[in-house]
Amino acid sequence: MSDIQSEIQADPAVPTTPTVRFADFGLSPDILRALNDQGYVHPTPIQAEAIPVVLQGRDVMGAAQTGTGKTAGFSLPIIQLLLAHANTSASPARHPVRALILTPTRELADQVAENVKAYCRHTPLRSTVVFGGVDIAPQTAALRSGIEIVIATPGRLLDHVQQKTLNLSQTQILVMDEADRMLDMGFLPDLQRIINLLPKERQNLMFSATFSGEIKKLAATFLKSPVTIEVARSNATADNVTQTMYHVNDQTKAEAVSHIIRERKLKQVIVFSNTKIGASKLARHLENEGVNASAIHGDKTQNERMAALEAFKRGEIEVLVATDVAARGLDIAELPCVINFDLPYNAEDYVHRIGRTGRAGASGDAISLYADKDERLLVDIEKMIKHKFVRAELTGFVAKPASAERERSSGRGADGRNGRGASSDRSTQHTRSAYTSTPTSRKEKIDPWFLKPYEPTLAAEVDSASIAPAGGSIKPSKVKLAALLGGLPKN
Ligand code: AMP
């Protein structure tokens, strides 16, 4: 995370709008210089649509999938609008919070923050990110120094409000990124609390990959005459992704995954597991099979997750086994393949998962495994994406049930947590096999932790987004936030 330019770069596979240039929007030369640094010349379709609308001060309801360039779509015009207030004064009072960007997970918050920081780098505007699971002190220091753009997960943001290190009374612009996921994660009470802290007169931007009735209801409560911007049909899967559905025996799914990885010689793949313990066990199984794999989920510290992600991006780890919450919003460009080890309980998650591949115009493979018991989940997905799958059999693969069984019955995850993660996992009730994911109801997907009303943590160590996947077992990282994020703003 140290070098911004190496993290955020023009993605040659991103479909841009060749007839339009960033210079056409009337953006400040300081912003154009930053875009030039990144190698961006032409906007992506959502950028081409969103930038002028946001610059006009209108509210926006954006239906955009991952990899469309939506982060710059909202960040650039926000920076332009805030430049009217930019100043180099040392006084914190001259740098009130003017824009608040809310994201469901700390990884997404971190990525958005990196982008914003890169786009602001030639302006006096200050930005920072706050999320849980890390020491609150550096965040407090940054906020106290005066920050115009705050990127945050909801729980930690409320902790800062509670501790009076953050005042939102001058916030002019609110962005809700990945709003569907925020609702999925039970953040609605926190969001309402945050909205109540903001001035009534403000601009609101909401982005979501999918638009359920619930999302529309939320939008109706806080967006004012929004302009709807849709760059891909909502609830649609990317056209350039080849989707394959393999019927497998539930007992031998882990071996099926290693078989697929070997057969297809996959070198960079995210495998989705519905449970944390399932992710850990699968990663261990793959390692035993000689595949360089790592699990990324909420039981891991922030440091461990970031390290795994970075190693994956560098190609040192070939397979990242992830839960939905951990993988949400990860910006990993040109991922050739995702594998659904478990079909998701919620069909919308299928759209999010396969959005990891085929991003930005590149082609991709989405391979899913399903067992007999998953038929209902499969039908739910088919209904959502309006596509009937060919149910294929995975051939040429000889399972070793004995070894699979031995691993399952050992009860220890790859992280040596002795299955502790499962007790707080979404599928706690189904841990008779770590590889088994039968939900009794779709409601169980939400960890009950999320349904509790907001209670600020005294030490404010852990925010609700970050604790979410971990339940009570998260270990707050001792790493300084500034180091993690590549340094705090210089001015
Ligand atoms: P996002 O959907 O905001 O996560 O962006 C997806 C990827 O596209 C990121 O890697 C960006 O760095 C890249 N990107 C965003 N906008 C552009 C652009 N106009 N030209 C080239 N690459 C872009």
Image (cartoon, rainbow, N blue to C red):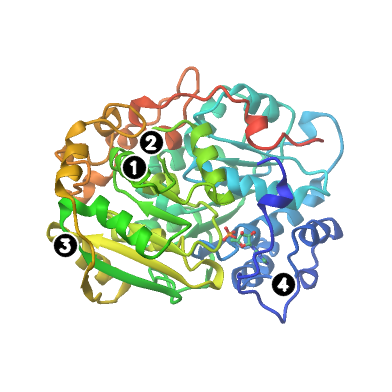
Q: Earlier in the sequence, mark 3 or mark 4?
A: 4
Q: How far apart in space, not on screen, are marks 2 and 4 (Cα)? A: 38 Å
Displayed quadrant of residue 405: top left
- For residue 468, the mark is 2
Q: Earlier in the sequence, mark 3 or mark 1?
A: 1
Q: Does mark 1's beta carbon lie closer than 8 Å to ligand 1?
A: no
Residue of label 4:
42
Give coordinates of residue 62: x percent, y percent: 52, 64
Q: How far apart in space, not on screen, are marks 1 and 2 (Cα)? A: 29 Å
Disc 2 to disc 3: CB gap under 8 Å: no
Describe residue 17's horizontal placement relative to residue 420 as left or right.
right
Q: 87 or 265, which is in the foreground?
A: 265
Q: Does mark 4's beta carbon lie closer than 8 Å to ligand 1?
A: yes
**Badge 3: residue crowd in 10 Å (few <14, some 14–19, many ≥20):** few
Give, as a three-letter code, the residue at label 4.
Answer: His
Outermost residue toward the top?
A: 458
Residue of label 3:
376
Q: Is residue 421 visible?
A: yes
Quarter of the image where ligand 1 sits: bottom right
Describe residue 15's horizontal placement relative to residue 462 as left or right.
right
Q: How far apart in space, not on screen, are marks 3 and 4 (Cα)? A: 43 Å
Give coordinates of residue 225: x percent, y percent: 53, 65
Q: Earlier in the sequence, mark 2 or mark 3?
A: 3
Secondary structure under the numbered disc 3 in the rendered image: helix
Disc 2 to disc 4: CB gap under 8 Å: no
Give, as a three-letter code, the residue at label 3.
Answer: Arg
Displayed quadrant of residue 40: bottom right
Residue of label 1:
288
Secondary structure under the numbered disc 1 in the rendered image: helix
Q: Nearer the viewer, mark 3 or mark 1?
A: 1
Describe residue 26's horizontal placement relative to residue 380 as left or right.
right
Judge whether 464 appears above or below 232 on screen.
Answer: above
